[in-house]
Amino acid sequence: MRHNEDDELQGRLGYRFRDPELLIRALTHSSAIPELRAAAEASGGSSSGMQDNERLEFLGDAVLDLLASEYLVGKFPDWSEGQLSRSRAYLVNAQALVEAARRLGIGEFLRLGRGEEKTGGREKAAIVADALEAIVGAIFLDSGLDAARDLLRRLLFEFALEGGGAHIADSDRKSALQEFLQGRGQPPAEYRLAREEGPDHQKLFHIEVWSLGECLASGDGSTKKEAEQKAARAALERLEHAGTRD
């Protein structure tokens, strides 16, 4: 990673590493290791200490579970264990990590092998989500729980729970719309991307939800999933309101 790239990503993270090698390791996919080792040996250097990000990802996953649990218990003291468990699953699921990683543009900074690069590895959901977990693990090793807690609060938890948990409340609006339409004997809703705007790390998606040849509603979001949920919520509100008038 070049120095200016290092600085740019740390600026986006809002965290500066005391040991920059931890960040480099967190961004190193396993596909890059053979080529990096070959390059080091060709230049007369040692390749024995080179590591990919899998161990850091393992650690980051555990840190993420712990801090998500802590955040929810503190934020919602009246919630039951079941509510807390469902909400934690929503906070730390793969899609939430992918969305956070893409907001940061982590894909730009990954170290990938040539084969993975050619097949679009920088955009692959599993790779960017794993890299984000590895970064969490790296920050934990670099500075401890407080630093990891601050990052996750800003990047993941508060974003997901803005509006006092509204994102969790809306997290299954697509299923609710599906059940509503099925109850009326209608086919499942279809979600269509109407347009997208902005650079790759700050995309805005506009999604329309259709049924029986009619656009029921639309929604905007920084991810397609978020826009679909908003469109589904708007469609439900419209259909339920129409039902009260009948």
Image: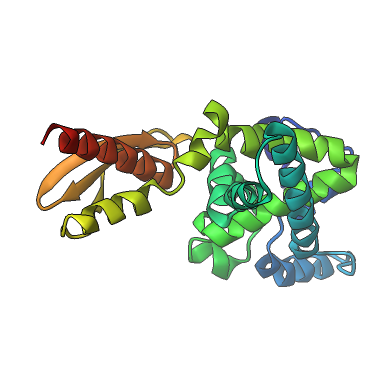
Residue 24: percent from the left, percent from the top?
Answer: 77, 50
| Residue 33, picture quadrant | bottom right
Nearer the observer, 77 or 149:
77
User: Which residue: 65% across, 58% down?
Assistant: 130
- The way the protein has been coloured in the rendering is rainbow
Q: Is residue 105 above or below residue 35?
A: above
**Residue 109 can be seen, yes or no:** yes
Q: Does 12 sit left or right of 117 as displayed?
A: right
**Would residue 235 be found to the left or right of residue 120 on screen?**
left
Query: Residue 143, percent across and down?
Result: 89, 39
Which quadrant of the view contains residue 50? bottom right
Q: Residue at x 64, y 49 (%)?
A: 88
- Is residue 237 placed above or below 224 in the rendered structure? above
Q: If the image is split into quadrants, where does the C terminus sit?
A: top left
Does the rendering let one see residue 7?
Answer: no
Image position of 214 with respect to 246: above or below:
below
The outermost residue toward the top is 163
Q: Measuring 17% from the left and 55% from the top, which residue is drawn there? A: 184
User: Percent position (x, y) of residue 215?
Assistant: 16, 42
**Picture coordinates of residue 232 (x, y %)?**
31, 43
Count every numbered label the image shows and give the total.
0
Specify the quadrant of the image occupied by residue 25.
bottom right
